[in-house]
Image: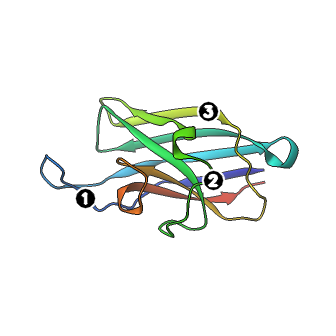
């Protein structure tokens, strides 16, 4: 099963210590599930944000963007996306995560923590095979 999506901004602006800044995001994600009951998932994620030199947590979540659902595994299991000085992060990973065919999923990228108000970007995944 192959799922693909394109990232869209969710959090409208950041403004912790620095000035308020509109979030800009581009990029895509591809998930390839295989094995017994789709128990292995290969992830290829490429994202660009107007942030730099940060590590951003991310997760695979059932349903549509913004629904507040809990990730399919502990967010710590997914690791972090390393953004370089250009704001681009590329991640390739093999996860022991089972995805159910016919279920809608999305990928969330967080600024910090894993709450709905910390989601910077989201990509709804559609089946391509």
- Of 79 and 51, which appears nearest the observer? 79
Q: CA distance from mark 3 to mark 1?
A: 29 Å
Q: CA distance from mark 1 to mark 2?
A: 27 Å
Is residue 61 shown above or below 96? below
Q: Position of residue 126 (x, y in %)?
A: 66, 60
> Of callouts 1 and 2, which one flags the residue occurring earlier in the amino acid sequence?
1
Res. 22 mark:
none
Q: Secondary structure at mark 3?
A: strand
Q: Residue at x 29, y 54 (%)?
A: 23
| Quadrant for the C terminus in the image | bottom right
> Of callouts 3 and 1, which one flags the residue occurring earlier in the amino acid sequence?
1
In the drawing, does residue 13 fall left or right of residue 129? left
Residue 57 occupies which quadrant of the picture?
top left
For mark 1, what is the residue? 13
User: Between tags 2 and 3, which lies in front?
Assistant: 2
Q: Position of residue 66 (x, y in %)?
A: 47, 68
For mark 2, what is the residue? 72
Q: Marks 1 and 3: in contact by CB < 8 Å?
A: no
Q: Position of residue 113 (x, y in %)?
A: 39, 49
> Of callouts 2 and 3, which one flags the residue occurring earlier in the amino acid sequence?
2
Res. 93 mark:
3
In the drawing, does residue 117 fall left or right of residue 46? left
Q: Residue at x 62, y 33 (%)?
A: 93
Q: Marks 2 and 1: in contact by CB < 8 Å?
A: no
Q: Position of residue 102 (x, y in %)?
A: 77, 65
- Of 80 and 30, which appears nearest the observer? 80
User: Between tags 1 and 2, which lies in front?
Assistant: 2
Q: Secondary structure at mark 1?
A: strand
Residue 50 occupies which quadrant of the picture?
top left
Q: Residue at x 33, y 60 (%)?
A: 11
Q: Residue at x 56, y 68 (%)?
A: 64
Mark 3 Cα within 10 Å, few/some/many (few <14, many 20+)? Answer: few
């Amino acid at each position: 099963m192959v799922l693909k999506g394109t990232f869209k901004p969710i959090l409208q602006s950041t403004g912790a210590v620095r000035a308020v800044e509109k979030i800009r995001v581009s990029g895509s994600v591809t998930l390839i599930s295989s094995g017994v009951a789709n128990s292995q998932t290969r992830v290829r994620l490429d994202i660009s944000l107007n942030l730099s030199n940060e590590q951003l947590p991310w997760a695979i979540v059932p349903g549509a963007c913004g629904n507040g659902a809990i990730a399919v595994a502990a967010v710590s299991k997914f690791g972090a996306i390393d953004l370089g000085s250009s704001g681009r992060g590329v991640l390739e990973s093999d996860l022991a995560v089972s995805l159910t065919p016919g279920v809608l999923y999305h990928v969330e990228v967080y600024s910090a923590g894993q709450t709905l108000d910390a989601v910077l970007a989201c990509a709804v995944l559609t089946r391509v095979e």
